[in-house]
Amino acid sequence: MNKPDRRLVIVVRADPVICGHSGEARNLAEVALTRGFTDVRLLTWPIPVLQAAGLPLKPLDRLLPYSEGITVERPEAVGDYRVPDGRHLAGLTGRLVELLAEPIPTVCLSMYLVPHQTVVVDAVQAARAAGLAPDVHTIAKAVGSDVTNVIRQCLREGRFGAATVLFTTFLANDEVVAVSEYTKDEIIASALEVDAACGTSFAAQCRERVTVSYPPIDSSAYLDLDPAAVDAALARRGLERDGYILFLSRVARAKGIYDLVIAYGQMRSRDKVKLVVAGTGPALEHVQAMAKEDDRIIFLTDVDDEEKPLLMRGCAAYALPTKPEPDFVETFGIALAEKMLAGGGPVITTLTGGTGEAVGDTAVIVEPGDINALADALDHAVLDMTEAEKREMAARALSKALTFDRAAVFDSLLSAKN
């Protein structure tokens, strides 16, 4: 076997976690193989640890395989049982040091600032302190919840020391990236608060250094879908084309799932379309209890990556009425762009966080939390929009979503790196 001469390591919460950013890692890894990287590693967590964390996970027996040349590593914990989080971080950091010790030019990308950027910065510092002289270029990508959950929580609770650590570690990377313009603005705004409290200068550094790299999407998985495959997938679920409204996302309050279920109950067109809730998440059991008397609301908790675009293509409309919550704000909306690639009925969403960057002017927009407006928008999509209007909106949506194709995003972010 030939020795690799160019390596990409992505430190991330990878599959089987249901998360747009695990998809980002997969897509960047696949493109890397076509851009001169001869060894690609996803450095992630043991599956039992992910399960114990209560994260929504995909069916383990239906995960899509990675291409040859991509290795998923799940280092076991180091040390005894008394410090479980530290043990697993030590495993990740130690394995990365071992990779950096090899004389291979390496790009190391961390996704999620907590804890993955800490793994990267600590590993690089340790390797250099040990005299290993790693040939490494580091990139830290701040995804939505890094800012809207972790940093904002630090600021709400006055924990400026923790926020200082986050910014210091973030800026210790060779490059710092945000998943959207909204996220970049939130990073700078948060840095200003820390500066005001601590006398630091993070905001100026963030303004100067943070760039934007939108989520990379595998367009080929959503384009030119076989009509027979769409019909077969729907038949297996007892569905018909244009016979359902689709919600496919994490089932959580911030995604607007409660608003959607209530809106569906008052829709004029509910006799024409079912409501399909596809996904898992912290609000699932509560929402199921809310809908237990409504046999037209269908819950699908086992949708895999192959079925997802087929369900998107066949729906009468796709609804993601996301709204800001203290613990989460939608900072892009990967599922929105995926739906725009798949076709089918129109996207109905809100201008929350970075969703406007994802959909542009190609979706039906309602105010966050406005249940009456949401019901009216869904009825309009089902009852009033002509086929010509739907085709025109779908064409514009496709053109917009293609700008997030994984090859273009990869080339902008990574192709020129060592």
Image (cartoon, rainbow, N blue to C red):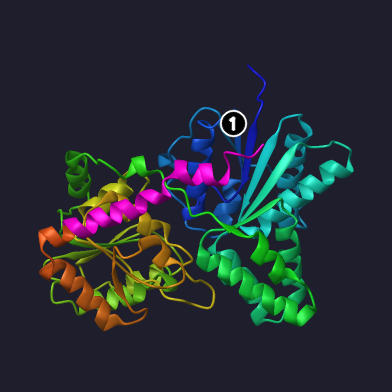
Q: Going by the image, does 162 lie left or right of 310?
A: right
Q: Residues within 10 Å of mark 1 (few under 14, many from 20)?
A: many
Q: Going by the image, does 400 lie left or right of 146?
A: left
- Residue 234 position, x and y percent, is 20, 49
- Classify 373 as above or below 23: below
Toward the viewer: 342 or 264? Answer: 342
- Classify 415 as above or below 328: above
Residue 408 counted in the magenta span: yes
Q: Going by the image, does 321 lie left or right of 297?
A: right
- Residue at 17 percent across and 73 percent down: it is 379
Mark 1 residue type? Phe
Q: Which region of the structure is painted magenta?
A: 391-418
- Residue 347 position, x and y percent, is 28, 63
Q: Tell me the quadrant of the picture where the N terminus can be found.
A: top right
Toward the viewer: 185 or 156? Answer: 185
Q: Tell me the quadrant of the picture where the C terminus can be found.
A: top right
**Residue topped by disc 1:** 37
- Classify 76 as above or below 369: above
- Residue 199 position, x and y percent, is 80, 78
- Residue at 13 percent across and 77 percent down: it is 268
Q: Going by the image, does 249 lie left or right of 393?
A: right
The answer to which image quadrant residue 377 occupies is: bottom left
Main SS of the magenta part reads helix
The answer to which image quadrant residue 388 occupies is: bottom left
- Residue at 37 percent across and 45 percent down: it is 305
Tell me the element at label 1. loop
Residue 258 counted in the magenta span: no
Residue positioned most to the front: 208
- Residue 276 position, x and y percent, is 26, 62
